[in-house]
């Protein structure tokens, strides 16, 4: 179980701090679905793992959508009559509604009011708002700050540009023995929000790093993309590659203190769904499995009925259900080294299951083989056997060419790693052979 | 969702009172499986909806059964020696065992005793008893009254006739675009018992009225029939028509204060079973779904293995489980306007599901279509979407020609009406097309 | 339901005492997987039922295993310097590790220590230990006794032989109309342990006795065999016969005070699995159904993937889970007449289900047949029907050639015996015919 081992060989808290450190580095950047913010973000990921950058011109048709103009912003503020910046983009990238059109004007509070977004029920927090496809401008601020504004004239400035340009995304690819692919997809478009989705960016980057230089069964593709339009653009331009995706995970909101939530793919019983559920059941943390629903992150696109790819979504707290979601409270204090490292461990374990899951054939299917003469059993009878020997019996009994190691792990209640180790041992003893032509078996999928 | 709307446009309590009023009008009539009581009952239903009356001669062979002689009764009593009527048919049609042969005699209490039916454990109630197929006579009275009879001679009179005649039933039919039929079946043979089944007669009559003059997908057939022998007679004489039944409901005991019970058809997963379960889950009242069992009302015949029709049974309290069942306590106070109206609403909602349930094909199956440019999405991003938009995403994602709107309603947990409305809107936007050749789709079933 | 009836015609406590008596008779014998102990055991069973004895020579190859040398033991002891037997095989056959090689030596306690087996956490009990396949010797004793041994010289004697000889097992066979077989398998190799498995030996012997002289549907084979190697030897030598096994039960640990546990066959939904679960649900004792797992008794071999026979395992307390397991506390006080008799009843009921389970065809599938005219219904209407009549309706409704009587018993919640009786009555009335060609129907399986 090589990937998890690679994580566990190091001090977990140290890895967690590195993950948090990377999120902190990315936090101040004002990202959007296009523009220099996401370019800068990808550049910093690219220092850690080799990243291939794609630029899709504005106006490109991608299925039912059109790549929008590129948005960039230098500065924004609301100044009061004394010239004091009462709302200042330099303090938080959330203060400007993402994709705001440029504006430079003086106006009364009542004229300004329709352009101010607040959260009356969370009066101290700045909301995160966007207007990608309807030209508009606005400021986001705390409700209390809004209430403190007096009715006089304000100077309003959004120094942004919305011009023909590009939509940018990054890909990290590593080849395995098999051309079939595992997809890891993270959205990289949200500005200063830590759990959503600097947590996903950091964990995906570190997960990718684990794969470099390894002998792998599958090929892996990591997408660091703007949400929705990015996934749509990638799918529209890579239909051939999409066909090679055998398993996939969207990673989002995986740094907070909540237990894990895994949202199943539209198929509901894909191998990734079962692998994720199995790993979470054994990970030692609270976890819950959720049925697929069409609202969410980019699994929406991968699981649209025309593609119906086996792509699930791994989260800790579910987006939309925690009060910090899409507010300024989703900051660097909301994500934690320990949880980031735990999420990396879970992802590594899931990939280990995908890499190791196969169907075998017991070469001695009539009665049990005599494990004792091969030193695979305990020598003194009368005592109950241990879990390692039990795992061997499970693997032997169910390796009939029909049941995969994951099937056997599920039935037995034993962790996949123990079942896998038993299978390796039995294979070395000549008691197991790889099942030929079985779906999911490596031989059948090259 | 047109039928429910038609109910809800009026004051619900008013409808409930009309339903109760109709039950009250029918209450005093002494009905049986044949004779003038059921004729009179059908005549009064026929004043509200066009009813086609059939008369099947005594002696007609219907499958394994024979239509019995026609039973009519004018009067019956037990007089004591002073000439006082101690048991008087004029006071309650339950006092005479239904189908009693004529008798006129003087006898001692000990001779009379074997012909007296009482309920020792409910000593104030008169039981309902019948002897359709074994010639016999008897009186039903409260156990306390029986105990008060002293041991002297009584004059016994049952002024009934049991002669060759007819079995009578009524049919209401309305044609839809489709020759496939929805069957609503109610037994009309019980004498002065309100919940069982004046409640069913009243609700079915009003439900039929809702259909008149409407543009309908299915054709509808309402049967007002004597229990068991009536259903058997209809099926024996209409095997061709029985083949056209796609969905069916038996209505009984739907006026009392209990929550709903729906007993599934023998098939267990018929569309009617799923439609009824869905409607009851969302109706705001307590409800329970029961598996099919072969004992019950006329679903026994429709679901006999040779027919195996998709016919379930909608009740409030389940017959046989409430103490008033088949006693004089099942009177007009036992049924209530509010519950009668609620039952009509539930029935209308179930028919709305049957009428509206179809499979569609998302015309943009690769990634989500851009709902925003069609004004079908919220314009400011960052906030969670509402249920109406969510319903559109559900319909789009699962409209792959395999999932019906009812499937989608069940998966999403949203009410069918909301899913239906979303589908109508998406159809108007050109985003949905009707799935061709799909089972359950209208196009395939004309 | 003939077999259960045969049990219930006698006084149950009396049967229980006979079962316990038989276990007591077998208790002192030192059994092993080969040798005179098991021969003597089979001889005593052979006095009660006709038993065919097989002897398989040492060295015979049986699948991946080799029949070991035959082990016999006359005496064994540890004497202290005063000549007193501190550990004495004559007092308990458990004192010697089963299959100990001969030894006759004087040695210090420290030299002896590695050959002493105790249970530190159950310091008063003697453990049961074996070393069938690794030549070794040892004594088993209570931990307290071991602690009381002082550090001086001991005289150690195991007067055993381990020579070329035979593995012995017994078979009881009875022919039915059908050559398909029901297998009952019990291990007969454990020395003085009452629940494991004198309980199984006694119940199987009495169960076999019930079958003698009866008209039976299936043929029955009872195997009294050494665990593991005996089942493997039988399967290796009887592959043809193994193919005829349609249902099977391993009986073990069925005399203690615990509720029943039935471990399903590897198939999980075999008829034996459903029959056992049904009988236990209705037996009036606590019971639990366990999924198959590859560790256990001889179901391990019958359910190896090459055979995958429909063989489950009936127990009361599950081996390995009760503290008396494989210790001297599993003695004659640990098993009880009442529980032994209850286990015999459960086994008889399970065989009754297998014998009686068939698929029928309702000869009147269109609507219900009129049961009243055949005196199969109650004559006065209005009252709820009883369970016997209800059973008839269940049988009629589901006898469509697809549902077996066991299917119908499961659906209805009624005991199989009541469903079976209803079917017999309906068959006599001409209302039921045997389904032709249906799997599980007798006609199809001759």
Image (cartoon, coloured by chain):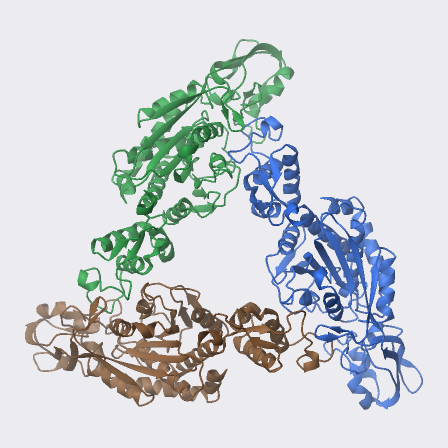
Chain colours: A green, B blue, C brown
- Residue C284 visible to the viewer: no
Residue visible at 55% across and 74% down? C360
Residue A121 visible in the picture:
yes
Report the number of discs.
0
Residue C265: give x, y in percent of width and height. 39, 67
Left or right: where A280 falls relative to B386: left
In the rendered view, tell whether residue A233 sits above or below residue A426.
Answer: above
Nearer the observer, C154 or A130? A130
Q: Quadrant of residue B363?
A: top right
Q: Quadrant of residue A183?
A: top left
Q: In what quadrant of the picture does the C terminus of chain C appear?
A: bottom left
Instruction: Give coordinates of residue C138: x percent, y percent.
Output: 15, 72
Nearest the eye: B234 or A92? B234
| Image spot of residue A426 (x, y percent) | 24, 55
Picture coordinates of residue C319 (x, y %)? Answer: 33, 70
Using residue B438 as the reference point, say whether residue A290 is left or right of it.
left
């Amino acid at each position: 179980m090589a990937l998890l081992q690679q994580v566990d060989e190091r001090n977990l808290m140290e890895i967690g701090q590195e993950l948090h450190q990377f999120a902190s580095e990315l936090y101040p950047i004002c990202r959007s679905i296009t523009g220099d913010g996401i370019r800068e973000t990808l550049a910093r990921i690219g220092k850690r793992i080799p990243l291939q950058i794609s630029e899709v011109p504005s106006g490109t048709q991608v299925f039912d959508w059109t790549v929008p103009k590129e948005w960039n912003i230098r500065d924004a503020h609301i100044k009061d009559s004394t010239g004091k910046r009462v709302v200042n983009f330099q303090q938080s990238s959330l203060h400007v509604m993402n994709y705001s059109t440029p504006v430079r004007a003086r106006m009364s509070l009542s004229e300004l009011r329709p352009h101010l977004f607040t959260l009356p029920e969370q009066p101290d927090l700045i909301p995160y708002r966007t207007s990608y496809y309807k030209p508009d401008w606005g400021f986001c601020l705390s409700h209390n700050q809004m209430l403190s504004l007096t009715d006089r004239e304000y100077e309003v400035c959004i120094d942004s540009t919305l011009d023909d340009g590009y939509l940018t995304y990054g890909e990290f690819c590593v080849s395995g023995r098999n051309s079939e692919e595992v997809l890891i997809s993270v959205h990289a478009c949200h500005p200063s929000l830590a759990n959503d989705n600097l947590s996903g960016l950091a964990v995906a980057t570190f997960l990718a790093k684990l794969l470099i230089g390894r002998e792998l069964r599958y090929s892996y593709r990591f997408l660091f993309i703007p949400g929705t339009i990015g996934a749509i653009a990638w799918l529209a331009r890579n239909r051939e590659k999409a066909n090679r995706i055998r398993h996939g995970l969207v990673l989002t909101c995986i740094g907070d203190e909540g237990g894990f939530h895994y949202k199943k793919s539209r198929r509901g019983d894909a191998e990734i769904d079962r692998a994720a559920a199995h790993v979470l059941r054994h990970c030692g943390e609270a976890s819950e499995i959720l049925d697929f629903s069409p609202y969410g992150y980019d699994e929406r696109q991968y699981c649209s009925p025309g593609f119906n790819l086996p792509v699930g979504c791994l989260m800790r707290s579910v987006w939309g259900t925690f009060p910090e979601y899409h507010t300024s409270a989703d900051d660097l204090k909301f994500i934690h080294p320990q949880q980031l490292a735990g999420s990396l461990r879970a992802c590594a374990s899931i990939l280990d299951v995908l890499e190791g899951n196969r169907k075998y054939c017991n070469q001695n299917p009539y009665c049990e083989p005599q494990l004792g003469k091969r030193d695979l059993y305990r020598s003194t009878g009368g005592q109950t056997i241990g879990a390692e020997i039990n795992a061997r019996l499970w693997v032997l009994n169910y390796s009939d060419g029909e049941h995969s190691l994951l099937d056997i792990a599920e039935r037995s209640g034993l962790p996949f790693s123990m079942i896998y180790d038993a299978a390796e041992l039995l294979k070395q003893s000549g008691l197991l052979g790889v099942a030929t032509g079985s779906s999911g078996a490596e031989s059948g999928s090259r």
